[in-house]
Amino acid sequence: MNARLKEPGIEQVEPGKYRVAVRIRINGKIIERREIVSGTKEKARDRRYILKRELREAKPAGSLTSTELRTFGDLLKIYKEKREQCSIAHLNKIRIVERELGMFPLPHFSERFEQYMRLLKTTNSEKTGKPRSNASLNRPVEIVRAVFNMGVALGLMETNPIIRARFPKLKVHSRDVILHDNDRQRLLNIINKEAPHLSAIVRFALQVPCRKSELVNMKKEDLDLIHNAIRVKAEIAKNDRGCWKPIPPDMVEYFRNLPNQTEYLFYREVEDKETGELKYSGLGSFHSAWQRCRKLANLQGLHFHDTRHMAATALIDNGTPEQVVMTVANWKTNMLRTYYHREPKTALDLVRFSPNHDREDAVKTPTASAL
């Protein structure tokens, strides 16, 4: 298999160039189109979608107009086709937006969307019974804006009506979650007992800043035991830019002794009911198992993504240069203002006063003549 194949229908042939392939069946006949696209991977995705639509509708590129799209749901359907590689969690958020906004007509969408956002701000969440957080209020705005940006990029409309001046991003306070050593050990002990298949991924996540989507998609082919590193491919990275994650010293043995049958670095064992043989699969979401262990450890409000904050903080506290932490975490910009959460009392241990203050004559009392 070509190692450069990033996703179905898109193959990088050289830096900045992609081969785009579309293959569909119409009335029993297979039709194919291939093109070389220069630019970014996102541009290649856009071109592949346009080619696919051309073949299905037998129309030249650029012939689509906003008159063919009546509702926001029509536009969102195209967006979902383009984002077929996105995570399950993001797909669920898209489905919520589709259910609540899909019927809004495009010509009057901005006015209807403004009313919808006003309603969200003034009513409590049906799930929690509490006012919605700014992060929750930002989510539909970000998705809707992305959908319209795609429409503009594909030439389906001239402008994006969801401008930031009218729908500004609300300020979100960073989560200040600190896991003390005894809390950390209690959580790991419970995971070892209740969900041992999560032990390795949690231990790794607490030491190396990673996204959950990166961890569950790591495979043996990404493992480099010579340099003790794991490759995160561009197609599973959030910013479409690959990186390398270091292997903590206490986990080298784990990776050296992976079962031959698993293709994933973090896996679960499943017994075949018919043969009794053990089979290996990826962890998937593991949301329920994580929540059960978190509650048993009495760690209210702890999200798995918080391990990313904790790992980045631990690396900085142990002397890792900030630029190195940014490289490991795969940040394009300095996100340490958001992710760095040192315990306040611990931070006091690092305060260093000027040595001049140790001298008795460092501060002299002014005399009367001086006054």
Image: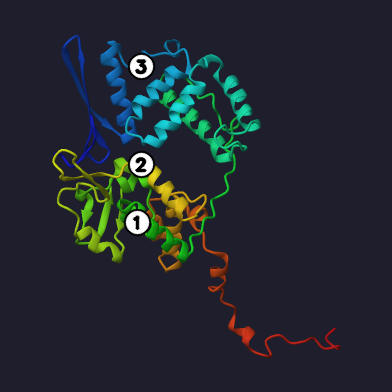
- Give the secondary structure at mark 2: loop
Mark 3 and mark 2 residues within 8 Å of each other at the beta carbon: no
**What's under tag 1, amino acid-wise?**
Lys
Which residue is nearer to you in this view: 199 or 47? 199
Q: Residues within 10 Å of mark 2 (few under 14, many from 20)?
A: some
The Cα–Cα distance between marks 1 and 2, rounded to whole angstroms, is 19 Å
Which of the 4 quarters of the picture holds residue 186? bottom left
Q: Position of residue 96 (x, y in %)?
A: 47, 27
User: Badge 2 is on which residue?
Assistant: 285
In this rendering, the answer to whether 103 lies above or below 273 is: above
Which residue is nearer to you in this view: 191 or 244? 191
Image quadrant in which the N terminus is located: top left
Q: Position of residue 356 (x, y in %)?
A: 62, 84
**What's under tag 2, amino acid-wise?**
Ser
User: Badge 1 is on which residue?
Assistant: 193
User: Badge 3 is on which residue?
Assistant: 62
Q: Residues within 10 Å of mark 1 (few under 14, many from 20)?
A: few
In the image, 346: left or right of 202?
A: right
The Cα–Cα distance between marks 3 and 2, rounded to whole angstroms, is 39 Å
